[in-house]
Image (cartoon, rainbow, N blue to C red):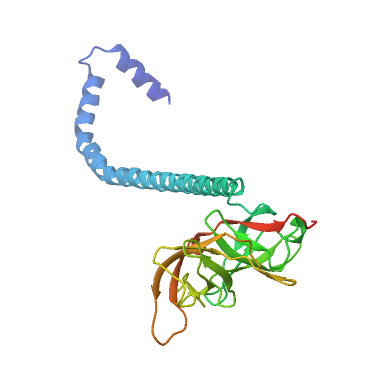
Amino acid sequence: MLLSIVLITIYFREPAGGGLHGVQSAGASVLRPFEVGAERIARPFRDAYGWFAGLIHAKSENGRLRLKLDQVTGQLIQSTNALEENADLKRQLQYIGSPAFPKDYRPVTTAIIARPPSEFQQEVGIAAGSSSGIRVDDAVVTSDGLVGKVSSVASHQSQVTLLTDPNLSVSARDFETRAIGLVGHGQGRGTLTLERVQKAQTLRRGDTIVTQYWKVGNLTALFPAGILIGYVSGALQSEVDLYWQAQIAPAVHFDSLTSVIVLVPKNRGR
């Protein structure tokens, strides 16, 4: 340590061209190749460290951005669903306030909470039941037309049999020609047929088909009169058949239902 202090003192006190300065220059010249070699050897390791550090940071940033994207996508889906639901409810409210809404009924607007379990079981679940005054056989509609009828009821939920179910038939009439028949499920998914229309009556392609109300003694039709069912998409007569063969395009899109209106008679208590 004493020698180091002495050498440092002499180095700083001697002129620039002194002996110690010469020794320093000679030593630097001798060690320069080793310094360059060490730099070249160390550079790949230093670059590799920097590359791995950058890769780890990029992966971390990528994960953060993916999480943020998922959150934004979820918010967008929720907003889109809310807008569609809001638009659907506005259409339902406009229908309820229109002259076409049956005046002897009060509406129970509710959401669809369960879809048909199979093509052979055309039923949906709704989020309203007996606590809202709903009973079995109540008519179910949307602003587009007839959906079906209530088939089972719990306190806060109900099952609705769709018009496309093979076990449901509806008394119907042609709004333009007054031809009367029965609407039931068709051959294809989501299709309907109009049956029991006598040949003497008139059916035309494009005619509007609505519900027909009737009352015989204590028996009455399940559905109020004048609810839209659909439109005649095809009608044929044959010499052998006693009735028209007619297909109906339903007014309601059963696959995209999100909410419905249950028609509850006003003279019924909750």
> Residue 244 location, x and y as percent?
44, 77
Residue 206's quadrant in the figure?
A: bottom left
- Which image quarter is the C terminus in? bottom right
Position of 125 with respect to 270 (left or right) is left
> Is 239 positioned to the left or the right of 222 in the image?
left
Residue at coordinates 20% horizontally, 28% vertically from top-left?
26
Of residue 199 and residue 191, the one placed in the foreground of this image is: 199
Image x and y of residue 232, in percent: 43, 67
Question: Residue 127 at x, y = what percent?
Answer: 67, 58
Query: Hey, which residue is sitting farthest front in the picture?
Result: 200
User: In this rendering, would 107 be left or right of 63?
Assistant: right
Q: Residue at x 39, y 85 (%)?
A: 239
Foreground of the two, 12 or 99: 99
Residues 67 and 255: in front is 255
Q: Name the residue nearer the viewer: 98 or 34.
A: 98
- Position of residue 232 relative to residue 38, above or below, is below
Q: Does residue 218 lie above or below 52 as drawn?
A: below
